[in-house]
Image (cartoon, rainbow, N blue to C red):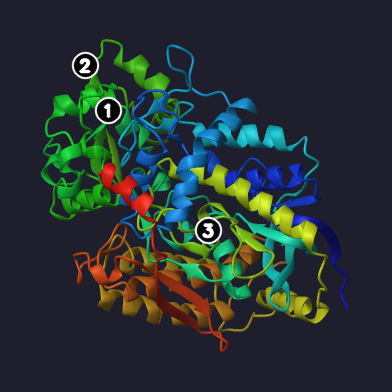
């Protein structure tokens, strides 16, 4: 029998972004031994790409803000299919998590009187996003790492987890490999926290990093946990569209929060043409009022560019489809126009949006202080994920917890900008806290070598598939990404999604024949082949959930069911793995919201 290097921890955290680091810090602070496994190098997690800010009702810029307004905004943005308890905890605890981050050394932008500055963002009633220019995620990761390095956490960089190890229903460890050398490793743990991020690499155009292949979603699903609301995939309205080499790279919502406007090729500010009725009272109906809002005037209503991301994305797609798009298939995002309003506009833009200025200068040879940017929707975030208990973040499998983007519940049908970073802090902390508690109350479980040997053999199968029918894993991934982009994208239809499912079945067969050359060391083709299983699971889950929800709500827009249907207004789609290995889906009613929270929503409409 092969020898596998084995590590033993009380709590194992898989993923080293904001949620994973915060969970590891909290578990370590509880006095248990913590291991941290990350797919790339420490500090390279996709959280560093988060730009706009951390949503928390600090009320530093507008004293009218509080947790109740934040709760109501988040529920409204999520179209009320959110798990209300998670939304409540998030709104109440986010301010303390931001202040904690500040105490640990995060350097935020400041108001004139020295408090943390907050900016406007889509869907938020008041300026709520604590930020560091447009590099907030980078500052978050720097701060959490600097704080965490003193906690005695063992870090295993450039490792990928292939399977969770179970004893009955309980999760007792994980099995994975070191990406550089290809060596398999066993991680025994009393509790495990999944914090692996999203699924963006299932799509052709995405703002997500290479790591986002749905690993946590697939690990939990294969182990027997449930996924919920996988149909709700958020397409950020503004990603780069030109040149092709940078297609999909995020253009932060902070550009619009600082006054950027969207125009078509005719120079028309088209967002004024499609303001939803439920947002009309909060939305400016002229350019001057929208500009005053971005400047912080409390009596002004927000510009239509700062409506929810699903709505803005669909408006952009409409302009492109109807022939009013930019030369390279997007629309224009213009921040340079504020020269009409500010005498020092160029310096103001460089100070407020330094990353965006350098990104366009270096990648597209565009000076955003002088020229408009070309942008279009890009796959950005999945609201769906692993089903967890709202208070503890534990899944239905004892010992398995999840937090951050790979968990689900807080965002409902659509996430508001900035809520992702505070979600990482609030629920990363809770996951670490309750994982440590579980670890203290339980012993290590046994590890079955036969099951691990089976996973290892399956992982090595691509080296054996070298006959004439073998498949290139890169080609399979490319075909899957194009299928999801074209058939399960921003606008969906049953006929197209049925076709997508047929193709996914064929991709599964092709993936079984995926072949790689060389050996296990330094082999990116092998890594790609191993990622395919995860991508296929999340792609099928998204498609099946989207078919089941026969309505348009939030990030899901069905061309064949273009309106909301009250039958789906209080249900989640639940996905689980059947005994025969097939994917099962059902609808389940949401838990009843208590009257005092219903009152909060009513008071903040």
Q: Residue 27: percent from the left, percent from the top?
A: 72, 48
Q: CA distance from mark 3 to mark 1?
A: 33 Å
Q: Which one is nearer the viewer's eye here, 285 or 429?
A: 429
* For residue 513, above or below residue 329: below
Q: Residue 554: percent from the left, percent from the top?
A: 30, 57
Q: Earlier in the sequence, mark 3 or mark 1?
A: 1
Q: CA distance from mark 2 to mark 1?
A: 10 Å
Contact (CB < 8 A) between labels 3 and 1? no
Q: Earlier in the sequence, mark 2 or mark 1?
A: 1
Q: CA distance from mark 2 to mark 3?
A: 43 Å
Contact (CB < 8 A) between labels 2 and 1? yes
Q: Is residue 378 visible?
A: no
Q: Earlier in the sequence, mark 2 or mark 3?
A: 2
Please name the residue shown 15% across and 24% down the image. 288
Please name the residue shown 73% across and 66% down the image. 174
**Left or right of 406 on screen, residue 400:** right
Please name the residue shown 51% across and 67% down the image. 535
Secondary structure state at the residue bearing disc 1: loop
Q: Which residue does the numbered mark 2 point to in the structure image?
A: 341
Q: Is residue 197 visible?
A: yes
């Amino acid at each position: 029998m092969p020898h596998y290097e084995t590590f033993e921890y009380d709590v194992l955290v898989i993923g080293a972004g904001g949620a994973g680091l915060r969970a590891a810090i909290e578990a370590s602070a509880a006095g248990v031994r913590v291991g941290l496994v990350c797919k790339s190098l420490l500090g390279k997690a996709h959280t560093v790409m988060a730009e706009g800010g951390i949503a928390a009702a600090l009320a530093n810029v507008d004293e009218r803000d509080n947790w109740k307004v934040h709760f109501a905004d988040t529920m409204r943005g999520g179209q009320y299919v959110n798990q209300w308890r998670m939304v409540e905890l998030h709104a109440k605890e986010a301010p303390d998590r931001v202040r904690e981050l500040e105490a640990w050394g995060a350097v935020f932008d400041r108001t004139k009187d020295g408090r943390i500055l907050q900016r406007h963002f889509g869907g938020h009633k008041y300026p709520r996003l604590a930020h560091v220019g447009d590099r907030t995620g980078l500052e978050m990761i720097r701060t959490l790492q600097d704080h965490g390095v003193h906690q005695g956490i063992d870090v295993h960089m450039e490792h990928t987890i292939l399977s969770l190890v179970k004893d009955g229903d309980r999760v007792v460890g994980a099995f994975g490999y070191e990406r550089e050398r290809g060596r398999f490793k066993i991680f025994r743990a009393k509790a495990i926290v999944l914090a692996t991020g999203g699924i963006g690499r299932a799509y052709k155009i995405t703002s997500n990093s290479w790591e986002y292949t749905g690993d946590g979603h697939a690990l939990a699903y294969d182990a027997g946990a449930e996924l919920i609301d996988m149909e709700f995939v958020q397409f950020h309205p503004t990603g780069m569209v030109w040149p092709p080499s940078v297609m999909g790279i995020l253009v932060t919502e902070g550009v619009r929060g600082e006054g950027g406007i969207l125009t078509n090729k005719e120079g028309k500010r088209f967002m004024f043409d499609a303001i939803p009725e439920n947002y009309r009272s909060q939305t400016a109906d002229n350019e001057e009022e929208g500009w005053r809002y971005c400047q912080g005037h409390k009596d002004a209503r927000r510009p239509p560019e700062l409506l929810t991301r699903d709505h803005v994305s669909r408006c952009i797609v409409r302009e492109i489809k109807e022939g009013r798009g930019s030369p390279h298939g997007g629309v224009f995002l213009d921040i340079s126009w504020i020269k009409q309003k500010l005498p020092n506009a160029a310096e103001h833009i460089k100070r407020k949006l330094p990353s965006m200025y350098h990104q366009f200068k270096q990648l597209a040879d565009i000076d955003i202080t002088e020229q408009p940017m070309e942008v279009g929707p890009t796959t950005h975030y999945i609201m769906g994920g692993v089903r967890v208990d709202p208070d503890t973040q534990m899944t239905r499998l004892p010992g398995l917890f999840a937090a951050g983007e790979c968990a689900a519940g807080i965002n409902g049908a659509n996430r508001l900008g900035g809520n992702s970073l505070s979600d990482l802090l609030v629920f990363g902390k809770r996951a670490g806290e309750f994982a440590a508690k579980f670890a203290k109350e339980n012993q290590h479980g046994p590890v079955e070598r036969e099951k691990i040997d089976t996973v290892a053999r399956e992982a090595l199968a691509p080296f054996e598939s070298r006959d004439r029918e073998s498949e290139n894993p890169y080609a399979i991934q490319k075909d899957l990404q194009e299928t999801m982009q074209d058939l399960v994208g921003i606008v969906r239809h049953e006929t197209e999604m049925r076709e997508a499912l047929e193709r996914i079945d064929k991709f599964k067969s092709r993936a079984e024949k995926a072949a790689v050359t060389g050996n296990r060391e330094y082999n990116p083709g092998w890594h790609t082949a191993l990622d395919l299983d995860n991508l296929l699971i999340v792609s099928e889950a998204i498609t099946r959930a989207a078919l089941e929800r026969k309505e348009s709500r939030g990030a899901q827009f069905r061309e064949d069911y273009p309106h909301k249907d009250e039958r789906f207004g209080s249900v989640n789609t639940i996905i689980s793995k059947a005994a025969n290995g097939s994917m099962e889906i059902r609808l389940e009613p949401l838990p009843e919201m208590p009257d005092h929270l219903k009152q909060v929503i009513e008071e903040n409409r």
